[in-house]
């Protein structure tokens, strides 16, 4: 019998995981490394983020893998192009996991130009620059994977997350376009949308709303970053080579009710 796990292996592939220093990004980065990929672990550049990213790199090295940390503030002009150039100098990127994003919750009428522009810059503008820089070379090589990390917010927006939810909906739209443009050249593009995942970002919110949110989740609990790993491995490997242009909710069934 042939090895049923062979198509999940990523030996010889290079993956860039943005926002890879903790939580969902960290879990996905470690999983891709365990599957054999060389990892570029992106962080936003602060001392704390550098330390976190270095710990992910050290963990990958301890398991016998290859990894390097790359700092880049996505609110800065040309951040996507600069990150793409830095990582490509290490190795051509085969797998792009777009996990980095920010959310600045505030009432609809209190949204400021500053907060709007920052979320657009980090969640969309820099994402576009990375896609422009990295997807065409994937297509020329005949193999590539793009996985955007979306959110249940793209379909069920929280009233205080109008801008963030809108960026996630736009990101899903881009996936549909990329899937049509590059699917015939060996590059798949998919959106992986977490539900209510307990992370540092939303811990305070979940202390207030967690019980009510959990009541609306059929599996009866909040998710963890590790719950995203299986779906990410599928979409980033040859095991998912015929999956293109989908929006995959990993939400415990929350969007089904």
Image: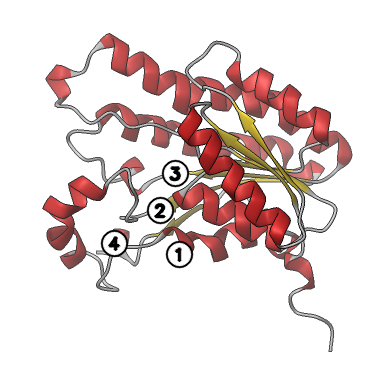
Q: For the point 87% across and 39% down, which residue is it?
A: 141
Q: Earlier in the sequence, mark 4 or mark 3?
A: 3
Q: Could you say which quadrant of the image residue 138 lies in?
A: top right
Residue assigned mark 2: 194
Which element carries disc 2, helix, strand or loop?
strand
Q: Which residue, given by chain and number where applicable, does mark 1 sit on?
A: 227
From what the image shows, is residue 244 above or below residue 77? below
The one nearer the camera, 11 or 150, is: 11
Disc nearest the viewer among 4 and 2:
2
Q: Which mark is residue 68?
A: none
Q: The C terminus appears in which quarter of the rendering?
A: bottom left
* Residue in the image at 54% along x and 62% along y: 229
Residue at horizontal 53 percent and vertical 50 percent from the top: 26
For label 3, the residue is 150
The answer to whether residue 112 is left or right of residue 200 is left
Separation of residues labelled 3 and 1 (CA atoms): 14 Å
Compared with residue 230, is residue 134 higher up or lower down, i.e. above or below?
Answer: above
Residues packed near mark 2 inside 10 Å, few (<14), some (14 to 19) or many (20 plus): many
Kindly identify the residue that appears in the image at 63 percent across and 36 percent down: 178
Q: Determine whether label 1 and label 2 are within 8 Å by CB.
A: yes
Which residue is the site of mark 4? 254
User: What is the x, y in percent for residue 93?
Assistant: 76, 38
Distance, label 4 to label 3, CA atoms, is: 15 Å
The reply to whether callout 4 and callout 2 are in contact (CB within 8 Å) is no
Rate crowding at label 4 as few (under 14), some (14 to 19) or many (20 or more) other CA atoms within 10 Å.
many
């Amino acid at each position: 019998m042939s090895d049923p796990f062979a198509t999940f292996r990523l030996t010889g592939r290079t993956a860039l995981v943005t926002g890879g220093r903790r939580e969902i990004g960290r879990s996905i980065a470690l999983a891709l490394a365990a599957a054999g990929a060389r990892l570029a672990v992106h962080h936003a550049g602060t001392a704390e983020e550098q330390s976190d990213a270095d710990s992910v790199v050290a963990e990958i090295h301890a398991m016998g893998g290859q990894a390097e940390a790359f700092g880049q503030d996505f609110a800065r002009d040309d951040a996507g192009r600069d990150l793409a150039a830095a990582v490509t100098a290490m190795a051509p990127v085969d797998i792009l996991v777009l996990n980095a994003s920010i959310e600045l919750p505030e009432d609809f009428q209190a949204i400021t130009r500053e907060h709007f522009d920052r979320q657009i810059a980090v969640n969309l503008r820099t994402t576009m620059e990375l896609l422009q820089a990295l997807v065409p070379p994937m297509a020329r090589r005949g193999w590539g994977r793009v996985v955007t990390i979306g959110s249940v917010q793209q379909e069920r927006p929280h009233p205080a997350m109008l801008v963030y939810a809108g960026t996630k909906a736009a990101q899903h739209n881009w996936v549909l376009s990329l899937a049509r443009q590059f699917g015939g050249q060996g590059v798949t593009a998919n959106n992986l949308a977490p539900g209510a995942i307990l992370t540092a970002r939303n811990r305070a919110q979940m202390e207030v709303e967690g019980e009510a949110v959990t009541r609306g989740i059929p599996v009866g609990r909040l998710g963890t970053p590790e719950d995203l790993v299986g779906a990410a491995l599928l979409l980033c490997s040859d095991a998912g080579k015929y999956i293109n242009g989908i929006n995959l909710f990993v939400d415990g069934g929350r969007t089904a009710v």
